[in-house]
Image (cartoon, grey):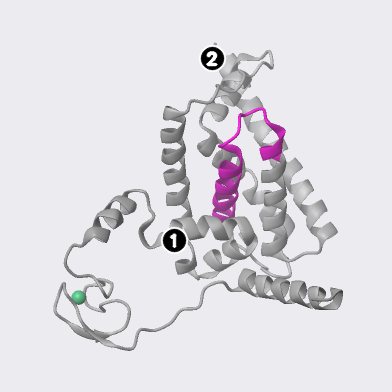
Amino acid sequence: MNSKGIGQFIQSKWQAFRAWQENPIRYRMDLTEHVCNCCGHRFVGNYCPVCSQPTGQGRITWSSIWQGIGQLWGVESKSAIYTLWQLLWRPGYLVRDFISGKRQVSYPPVKLLVILAALFALVHYFFPVPDPAPSDSGVRYVDLVFDWMNRHQNIGELLTGCFFILPTWWLFRRAPRYPDHTIPEGFFLQVYIAILAYITQAPFAASHPLPILLSTAYSYATYKQLFGYGYWQTLWRWTLCSVLSLVALLTVVLVAVLIGMLYQ
Ligand SMILES: [Zn+2]
């Protein structure tokens, strides 16, 4: 293959990847007739329209054991793992799909965050990681807040994310690709970003700089893909959004500290 051929090969692979990013799942209708093993209804399609049992469900087999255990961890139909895979390669497009009504492309995100927390708690039980260094700001209540957030990383990420909802709405409400997003849609954006932050940070020690950089880059990429502003337009909006959220978070901590001091 000459250099021109290699260039064309890379270009076609890139175009296929971009097409996958935009629309990764093609749904197909099953056109054969089935008799539902649960309610006996005769139907055409992937699910029984009367009792909603999927087609192909019959007597218990060996694979049913794996499916039964898998359901406990949310990996039924593999969509939890495929959702994480999509989140790594098309985060903003996945959020756009989910909040705009394509609910089936993603595993329920809040449930996913809880399952990941349980999974990592289990991993850390067998492979303990050192506790993050205690916060040392000199103010007891500030230390209490930050220590709690370090120890409850998943909830901490989501709580921090909640402070992004209003600034995001204000700075991105006229976005070209997803205009007029609502506050509840903004909440789910933060749930997905919390999942990304959690899966990039959880395997590392708290003080390691790489996961922080990685999750920051992912947050930017998610905003870029979802809202569709150019690189610089996204950068200053996203930076201002982060600064405003941090100011709001610190204000709440400060008010909590002042109230704590008043009642001491
Ligand atoms: Zn049925």
Q: Residue 152: percent from the left, percent from the top?
A: 51, 31
The image quadrant where one finds ligand 1 is bottom left
Give the percent coordinates (x, y) of residue 120. Answer: 46, 37
Residue furthest front as drawn: 1
Q: Of marks 2 and 1, which one's residue comes earlier in the chain?
A: 1
Residue at mark 2: 263
Residue 203 lies in the magenta stretch: yes
Q: Nearer the viewer, residue 37 or 183?
A: 37
Q: Give the image quarter of residue 92.
A: bottom right
Q: Identify the disc placed on residue 241.
A: none
Q: Which residues are magenta?
A: 186-212
**Residue drawn at 76 percent across, 74 percent down:** 11
Give whichever of 61, 128 is nearer the camera: 61
Q: Label 1 is placed on what type of residue?
A: Ser
Classify residue 115 as left or right of residue 55: right
Give the answer, above or below, for where 27 lies relative to 198.
below
CA–CA distance in space, label 2 to label 1:
49 Å
Which residue is drawn at the image coordinates 85% and 77% (left, top)? 4
> Does the image show residue 185?
no
Where is residue 85, by image quadrant? Answer: bottom right
Q: Is residue 191 magenta?
A: yes
Q: Quadrant of the N terminus?
A: bottom right
Give the residue number, with chain letter if any, for mark 1: 79
- Whether the residue carrying mark 2 lies under 8 Å from ligand 1 is answered with no
Residue 49: % across, % down:
26, 79
Q: Tag count in the figure?
A: 2
Q: Nearer the viewer, mark 2 or mark 1?
A: 1
Who is closer to the viewer here, 133 or 264? 133
The image shows residue 196 at horizontal and vertical percentages of 59, 48
* Residue 236 shows up from this direction: yes
Residue at figure coordinates x 63%, y 60% from the top left? 89
